[in-house]
Image (spheres, rainbow, N blue to C red):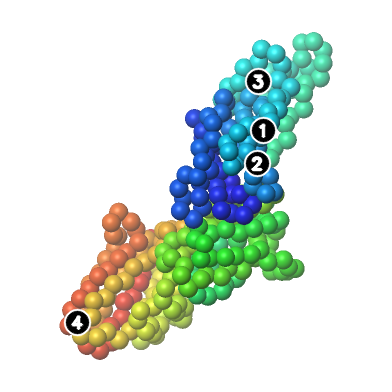
Amino acid sequence: LYTPDGRQIATAGEDGMVKLWRTASLTEARVLERQPDWPLALAFSPDGRRLAIGRYDGTVALVDTTTGRTLALRHSATPSGATSRRPGPEIRRGQQAGSGGERPARDGSAAAPGKPRVVPAALRSVSPTGAVRGSTVRLTLQGVNISDATHVFFDDPEITARVLRGPFPALKRSEVAVEATLGAGARVGIRRLFLQTPMGTTGAVTFAVGGWPEVAETEPNNALQNATPLVLPATSVGSLDPPGDVDTFTFQARAGQELVFQVVASAVRSRLNSVLTLLDASGRVLAENNDHANSVDSLLEFSQRLRGVVAPPVHQVSA
């Protein structure tokens, strides 16, 4: 759970420990006193100075996040002598085991109504899946219970973002529009993105930050004669669809130049299983790579005295 200003994260575990972490460095800021029962829910005050901790035994503690001191403790109306336990199969009062329904209790009273089911906010995907640092892009986020999201956070302080307010007729109810600005100092690589909503903070989805110009593929580009041209260094952006599709890119290579090609797919939640093939201008295979370092994402390194135009087609083996 993020603080309202996004500078800290609160976590809770089955061991009863609640910790505060610095968002920028992901280092511990404070370890609170161990809770007497499993902490199931956390909520910050608007100023982030107080943290409410809901426990499985029905108690709620209010803690000062600066000092770690417990400010207040509220007990639930648990009957005397009741004991707490971990969630598991349960038969409610007045309900027959395995019946799936409720019946009158032995004392003749009506069975207690079922508890309301709370569906937490969840973030499923982001499109596009990446952008170049130093740019401002509009993103479409898809998930559950995120339509009233209030804030957007990245795990890099050089990336700022805000939720855009419509109307956007093209958006579905499960989608949110976001504007993200990637500073020039943003770290290149895989970053993580979160949403804050009235239903809580979502889990993270990954987002790729690049340092080179992006070149979108131009279909059809299955063969050398209609390949998409690149000027290295560059990031080529495209999709392999349907299965078995091939994307081909051409570029000029200098003699003695070291060439490195990497597919970034699984890190941004793609199921692509790629193969990278490097050809010379005549179509002769110079190098090829399928999987690399226990990953289905291909990585190809090549260094040779080259002249002219070479083309690395990226083709899909399976998805």
Amino acid residing under circle 3: Ile
Disc 4 marks which residue? Answer: 256
Find the residue positioned furthest to the top: 107
Q: In front: mark 1 or mark 4?
A: 1
Dot 4: element: loop
Give the residue drawn at x 51%, y 66%.
158
Question: In the image, residue 254 lies at what x, y percent?
Answer: 24, 86
Disc 1 marks which residue? Answer: 71
Amino acid residing under circle 4: Gly
Rendered image: mark on residue 50 = 2
Give the residue drawn at x 27%, y 66%.
289
Distance Cα–Cα, label 1 vs label 4? 68 Å
Question: In the image, residue 147 lies at what x, y percent?
Answer: 69, 57
Find the residue positioned furthest to the right: 109
Find the residue positioned furthest to the left: 305
Q: Is residue 105 left or right of residue 203?
A: right
Q: Quadrant of residue 108?
A: top right
Q: Quadrant of residue 146?
A: bottom right
Dot 3: element: loop
- Badge 1 local density, few (<14 within 10 Å), some, or many (20+)? few
The numbered mark, 2 or 3, whose residue comes first in the sequence reads 2
The numbered mark, 3 or 1, whose residue comes first in the sequence reads 1
The numbered mark, 1 or 4, whose residue comes first in the sequence reads 1
Disc 3 marks which residue? Answer: 91
Q: Evaluate whether residue 120 shows in this view.
A: no
Amino acid residing under circle 1: Leu
Dot 1: element: strand
- Whether 10 is drawn above or below 217: the answer is above
Tell me if label 2 and label 1 are in contact, CB under 8 Å.
yes
Distance Cα–Cα, label 3 vs label 4? 73 Å
Q: Is residue 221 left or right of residue 113?
A: left
Q: Is residue 202 left or right of residue 267?
A: right
